Amino acid sequence: MKADRAVTAGFLVAAALLMSACSVGVGASMGAAAGPAVSQEPAVGGYEGWWNSTPVSGDISGLPKETVAVRTDTGEIVDASARDENGQAAAVDPDDVEYSVVVNPAWPEQSVVIIDTETDEVIESFRVDASGTPLR
């Protein structure tokens, strides 16, 4: 009888060890399946407004051909858009835009300014938080 209890206890201990090993394996594989860790770097870009829209009417008179979005706290170009020969606006890589930013101390702090690259005019501005998300 003591031998039966010892065998049963041994099986229970072995089963418990196997179960705990399986749960560790499941946890590890679930973490790996979740994908790579997301960067904590603030992502800035993708601003939309009248300056980079394409009117349904097709009339683009008065709209800029190319714009850059500049963070006023860093002077960095964080977004850009350009129109093709048909007036269709599209986002472009800021690194592909040949524009030198001249920071103006009159620009609002903690903001993004939209600049028409042809005229160097600030055509729009809006406040952003530290990550670049527009504040409403």
Image: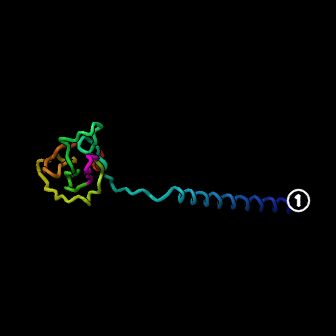
In the orientation shown, which residue stands out farthest toward the front? 86
Q: As drawn, is 13 to the left or to the right of 47?
A: right
Q: In the rendered structure, which amino acid carries the disc numbered 1?
A: Met
Q: Residue at x 58, y 57 (%)?
A: 27
Q: As drawn, is 43 to the left or to the right of 120?
A: right
Between 46 and 33, which is closer to the camera in this rendering? 46
From the viewer's perspective, is residue 48 above or below residue 39? above
> What residue range appears in magenta?
78-88
Task: Please tell me in which quadrant of the rendered image residue 54 appears.
Answer: top left
Q: As drawn, is 70 to the left or to the right of 21?
A: left
User: Which quadrant, please, contains the C terminus?
Assistant: top left
- Is residue 125 among the parts visible in the rendering? yes
Q: Residue at x 29, y 54 (%)?
A: 92
- Is residue 136 among the parts visible in the rendering? no
Q: Which residue is mark 1?
A: 1
Q: Residue at x 18, y 47 (%)?
A: 109
Q: How many marks?
A: 1
